[in-house]
Each structure stands twice: as C-alpha cells, then as structure tokens.
Amino acid sequence: MLLTVTLISAVIIFIEGVPLFKKKMWKEFITVLTLLIIAIFLVVEHGLGIPTPIDIANKLLYPLGRTVFRLH
C-alpha cells in the first residue's frame, strides 16, 4: 500500500507539481506537496497500526456517553 501511494504521489508530482514549479506558482505547488505528504503520512500511520485521533477520542468518550445516556 505504501509503495502504491508513493508511486502515485510521484506521478502526481510530475504531472501537477513540475508545471507549477516551472511557472513559479509557489502557493499551488506547496499545496499539492503538502496534501501528498499528508496522504503518505496517513498511509504509513495506518500501516503501522498507530491509532488516529478519532480512535483515541472514541476510546475516551464512549464510556462517558454510555454512562450519561444509559444506552442499553
């Protein structure tokens, strides 16, 4: 999965990033680069089994919600 995302990201950089860099469209280039870095980070995180912030929030708040609302 990581290899696939990395290869797709490289293709996107060549298709989208290089023309933006050549035209000196820095904001757009940084935006594309940032989104690709976030995508790669999320794939690595998922592959390593690191819990996401939503998982942590669910673990902390689920027992509280069951207690407050007395779900049966």
Image (spheres, helix red, strand yellow):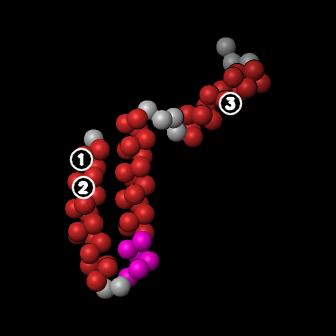
Q: Is residue 9 visible?
A: yes
Q: Is residue 69 visible?
A: no
Q: Measured along the vertical axis of the image, is residue 23 above or below residue 53?
A: below
The kind of residue on which mark 3 rests is: Leu
Which quadrant: the C terminus? Answer: top right
What is the secondary structure assignment of the residue under circle 1? helix
State the extent of the magenta-drawn residues as a range.
Answer: 25-30
1 left or right of 67 in image: left
The kind of residue on which mark 1 rests is: Thr
What is the secondary structure assignment of the residue under circle 2? helix
Please give the name of the residue rendered at 68% of the width and 30% of the height, measured from the top-left corner. 61
Asked if the stretch drawn in magenta spans residue 52, the answer is no
Which quadrant: the N terminus? Answer: top left
Disc 3 residue crowd, few under 14, some 14–19, many 20+, Cα 10 Å: few
Numbered label attached to residue 61:
3
Q: CA distance from mark 1 to mark 3?
A: 35 Å
**Residue 7, quarter of picture:** bottom left
Numbered label attached to residue 8:
2
Q: Measured along the vertical axis of the image, is residue 41 above or below residue 24?
A: above
